[in-house]
Amino acid sequence: MTDSKLLLCDCRKSQVIDAEQIGQATGISCSKIHTELCRAEAAVAEDAIGAGNVMIACGQEQSFFEEIAADLEVEAPLFVDLRDRAGWTDDTGTLTPKMAALVADAILPTPGEKVVDVESGGTCIILGEPDDALSAAALLCETLSVTVLLSANAELPIADDRRFDIVRGAIKSASGALGQFKLAFDSLQERIPGGRGAFNWTEPRSGGRTECDIVLDLRRGVQPLFPAPEKREGYLRADPGNSEARTKVLLEASQLTGTFEKPIYVKLNEQLCAHSRAQKSGCTRCLDLCPTGAITPNGDHVLVDAMTCAGCGSCSAVCPSGAISYDAPPVDHVFKRIHTLASTWRKLSSDEPRLLVHDTGYGLDLIRLSARYGKGLPSNVVPLESQALAGFGHAEMLGALAAGFKSVALLLSPGTEKDGLAFQVELANAIAGKDLVQLLEPMDPDQLEAGLAEDHGGAFDRQPILPIGSRRQITRLAAKTLNDADEPVSLPAGAPYGAVTLDLNSCTLCLSCVSLCPSGALKENPDMPQLRFQEDACLQCGICTTICPESALTLDPRLNLSDEALTPIVLKEEEPFQCVECGKPFGVRSMVEKMTEKLAGKHGMFQDNKAAKLIQMCDDCRVNAVYHSENNPFAMGERPRVRTTDDYISKRRDH
C-alpha cells in the first residue's frame, strides 16, 4: 500500500486530522481533509474508488463505500476507523501519533486465510416438543430436507404434514459440525404410514445412526448436545418461548445450504507436541481449555479437528512448545502489528502509549458508543482489533510491553474464553515484575471509560525490542528488557518455563527421563554417566516427574534470564563401573552396586558368588561367562574330526 492514497474525512468537522504528519509517519499519500465523503462529497469517494488502490478513513459508512465499489465492479477499498478510535474523544492530548499508528497498522498486508470447503445439502434434524418442533418443520420443509425427532412418549397432533418425516427416540451421542453431523439413537421408532386412525410406530430399536447437515435444537430445559454450543457451526439452539431467538435460528437454518468456506484457524506441528510419551501423560494445557472439544489426544501428540475448531485461540496462547499456533492470521503477524503500532507512534511522540486489545464485535461496539456518547478513548490508548482475543497470551502481552507500550489492557466480551486469559495475565505480570497487564470486563461504555481512566504503568526507559522469533524467544527477550537483573523470576505453578530439581541421593542415572523428554531439555553424555539439563528448553510438561522410577525429579516454575539457561548444566554425574573381567567401563557405579546388593544371594539366578559376579560384568564378558563355559546349555563336547578319503582307504586296507 505504499503507492496507495488515504482518503481523509473529518466527519462534518467533528475531529482534527493532521494529514501531513500522518503521511510522513506512514509513507502513505494523504488526500486533503474532506468533510462529508459519504454524502455531499460522495463523488470524490467514487472517483477514488474507481481509480483503485485507496484506503478510506471511515468505519461507520464502510458498507456505503463497498456498494459504490460493487456498482463500479472494482475491488472494494481498505478502511481504517480514525474517528471512533481516535478523533472523537474528550482528551485534549495530541491525537496524531495514534492516528498514524492506526493507519500504519491498517496498511500492513494481511496473510491469506487458509480455508476448506464445507458442503451442506440442507438435511436438517429438529429436536423439541411436538408443538415447537413441528411448527418449525412446517416453516423450513420447503427449503430444507427436514426430519423431526420427538421424545419416546410424544403424541402427534391429529393433522398430518407429509412434507417432512417424524421419528421418536433419544439421542445417544452427537459429533461433527455443519455438513457432517453424526447422530446415534436409542429406542428409535419410525411412523407406520398405513392403516386407519392414529399412526402406529415400529418397535423401538437401539443402535440407529444417521448423518445430517444441520441440527436445530428447540428443546426446553435440557443440556445442549455440544460444549460451547454457540461456537458449533450448524448447531442452532434457541428457547422456543423466546420468539426473537426462535425466529433468528429459523432464518439462519434456512440459509445453511450450499458450499461454505471454513477457515482453518490453527496449525499443528506434531513433532513439537509434549502431550505424552510412552503412554505417560504430560502437557494437557490445550485439552483443558478448548471450549468446543476440537482437540483430542492422539498417542504422543494431540489432534485438532478443523471442522469443530471455533478459532478462539486459547490453545495457541497456552501451548508451551509452539506445537499449536494460531494461523488466521499467523502469530508472527500479530507481533508485526504490535511493532508497527509502537514504532509509528514513536515517530511522532516521545510519550509512551497504552495498548487496548479488543475483539471485532462487542469491544468495537463499546469503543464506538463511548466515542459518540461518552468520553471516548484517552489519547494515549491505542486500540488493537483482534479476531482471537483469547489467543493474545503472555508472549504477546510481554512483546507489546517490550516494544514500547507502558501497559496492556484486554477488553473482554461476555463470550470471550476467560479461563486461560486470567492465568496469562498473571504470568505476564510475574515475568514483567509489575502489574502492567489487566483484564477489563465492562458492561457499558461508562465502565470502559472508568477502567481506562487510571493511567497505570511506569515510564518506558529502555530500548524497545523487535519482536521476531518464536513466542518463547520473544518472551525471554521481553523479560530481559523489562527486568533490571538476570536473576531467575519465580513464576506461578503451571507456567511453561522452569527448571527441574533433582534429588541426588535418589537418582540412579537410569536416564529414563532423558529418553522421554519431548523438548530435549534433559540430556545425557554419551562418554560418561551424566545427566544434563538445559533450562530454556524445558516446557514443564511433567513427563520426567511421572516416568522417574525413583521420584527424584520435581518441577520448579521460573524464568532464568541468565545465559546459564541457554547451555546444558550437569545435574548429576558418577564414575562408570569397570567390568570385573576386562576392566571396560559400563553402567553407573551406584546402580551396579545397588543391584548387586539387592540381588546377590537373594534372587534365584544369583544365589552363589559366581552367578552374582555376572551383575558386575559388561555385556561381552557376561555372554562369554554364560555361554562359553561349562554352564553353556548348548555345549556338546569336543567337535569330531572331519573324515577324509584317506580315512576310508586306510579302513579298507585294514580289512
Image (tube, grey):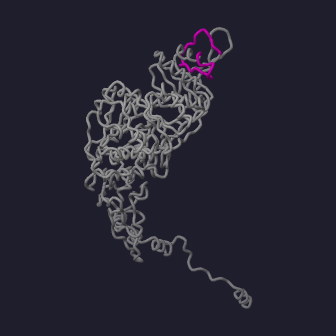
Residue at the spot x=60%, y=8% of the render?
158
Q: Residue furthest front?
A: 32
Q: Position of residue 135 (x, y in %)?
A: 56, 14
Q: Position of residue 39 (x, y in %)?
A: 48, 25
Task: Give the vertical position of 290 relative to 165 (above or below).
Answer: below
Task: Give the vertical position of 423 relative to 551 (above or below).
Answer: above
* Near-viewer residue (31 or 107): 31
In the rendered image, residue 158 lying in the magenta stretch gets the answer yes
Going by the image, does 314 lie left or right of 480? Answer: right
Q: Position of residue 610 (x, y in %)?
A: 40, 72
Residue at the spot x=59%, y=79% of the render?
639
Going by the image, does 300 lie left or right of 254? Answer: left
Residue 561 location, quadrant: bottom left
Q: Position of residue 555 (x, y in %)?
A: 32, 51
* Overall secondary structure of the magenta section: loop
Going by the image, does 558 lie left or right of 237? Answer: left
Looking at the rendered image, the quarter that the C terminus falls into is: bottom right
Residues in magenta? 138-162
In the rendered image, residue 297 lying in the magenta stretch gets the answer no
The answer to whether residue 555 shows anywhere in this view is no
* Near-viewer residue (559 or 58): 58
